[in-house]
Amino acid sequence: MSESRIVDARNTFCPGPLMELIANVKLAGVGDVLELLSTDEGSAADVPEWVHKIGYELLGSEKVEGVWHIKVRKTK
Amino acid sequence: MRILIVGGGTGGTILGNNLARRLSDEIRNGMVRLTMLSASDKHMYQPGLLYVAFGQMMPDQLYRDQASLLEPGISFHVDPVTEFHLDQNHVKTKSGKIYEYDILAIATGARIVPQEVPGMSEGAENFYTEEGAVSLHKRLMEFQGGTVAMVVSIPHKCPVAPVEAMFLLHDFFKARGIRDKVKLRYHYPVNHVHATANVARWAKPEFDKAGIEYETLFNVKEVDPVKKIVYSEEGTQCKYDLLIAIPPHRGMETVEENKLGQGGWIPTDRFKLTMNGHDNVYVIGDATNIPVSKTGSAAHFEAEVVAENIASVIKTGIPVRQYDGKVYCFIEAGYDRATYNAFDYVNLPDLKPPSKSIHWFKMAYNQMYWTTVRGLL
């Protein structure tokens, strides 16, 4: 059964939000959904680019009160 | 009051010594008992491994006897914890002893797991263990030309180490007079040459100037040691003659076996540094799951916060401050230049141009570390 988890990478610079997301993806199962919380403006472009290249599914990306919420499904 | 520190690395040792000083009266009159359990009687200066790989430090320079680093008020035992019973406030050790506590600090660190990437153990060198650093140095000295590739796994300790290693490789082969026969290729898992934007902005033109090639969005999937090809999760590959890997890391086995956190990373409050759901359990250093660098520097600053808070709680009943995410890391930019990266939860790193003076300060710090872990610096 697939699970959902939050990766709270707000206000962090090193190793940074995408690194935190990838580290958590490695621990997740196929089908799991991860929601990255990031205050780094770069995440809005960087995360979708990685998701597209690796072939996962981008479920959504929106900025709410200064925080990017980017949802990704691990598909393989 | 029984305080138990599990782990004798950078974080555990600074915490222990800091507490022993702050609580010297309470320890002397028997109100406080401070105990440290570690898996080893030796303490390793892990950042020195990079220098061992390039022949700039000898392995024996990395070690001190752990007992020699500790304040007399600390009861130190080489007896690793095998079982954590957090609901009963005690741990059980390898020797079978039970240690009860009122306050527990977990500082067990992280370990490399190259075996999680098929072919990495057989096909790649690394500088994250003494054995690995010595082996890499031998390979570098024997290397006569071809492609040296660096791949970076997630998560890993010391996020600036891959960048430093590339600059050192450049200068190493220059010094050997064969730089023109060596192609240096750097592969990094995110979109830029470093995860921290300001480091990436600085390192990219430096790579260009040094003739270091790079590929981003390269997450290591598999190494074929026979064909000498490394493959990425993103579908690309690199043919190499010598492969250097930053191996993936996990928290320690005992953390995973006791189900304290997935991947061996313990869920920790990023400000209070207490384990989620356990107010009398602190977690510092690589063992936490907080989104800061896994470095000795983070462990150092976290240990100071926890020491101040534990001492304050004992003396006044309340803690004094929160961890602000502070990290300070030197970045070697070659044999004779370095810069540094300092940041916290609020302030982005502001990289200064590399200089000889910062490099020499790092050289000095390689010795001053022993005063840091004693809690003096």
Image (cartoon, coloured by chain):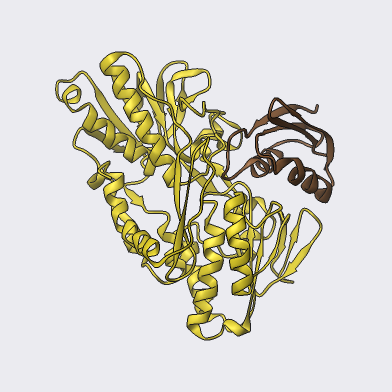
Chain colours: A brown, B yellow
Q: Can I make out residue B275 in this image?
A: yes
Horizontal and vertical percent position of residue A24: 67, 38
Q: Quadrant of residue B227?
A: bottom right
Horizontal and vertical percent position of residue B216: 71, 58
Q: Quadrant of residue B114?
A: bottom right
Vertical position of residue B340 compared to residue B315: above or below: below
Instruction: Work out which quarter of the rendered image holds the N terminus of chain B and state it.
Output: top left
Vertical position of residue B49 compared to residue B281: above or below: below
Number of on-image labels: 0
Horizontal and vertical percent position of residue B210: 59, 73
Name, please, the residue furthest toward the bottom: B177
The one nearer the camera, B30 or B179, is B179
* Left or right of B20 in this view: B337: right
The residue positioned 50% from the left and 69% from the top of the image is B168
The one nearer the camera, A37 or B122, is A37
* Left or right of B42 in this view: B211: right
Q: Quadrant of residue B26?
A: top left
Horizontal and vertical percent position of residue B262: 61, 33
The residue positioned 59% from the left and 61% from the top of the image is B203
* Left or right of B70 in this view: B168: right
The residue positioned 58% from the left and 59% from the top of the image is B202
Vertical position of residue B168 compared to residue A74: above or below: below
* Left or right of B78 in this view: B331: right
Q: Can I make out residue B95 in this image?
A: no
Instruction: Work out which quarter of the rendered image holds the C terminus of chain B and state it.
Output: top left
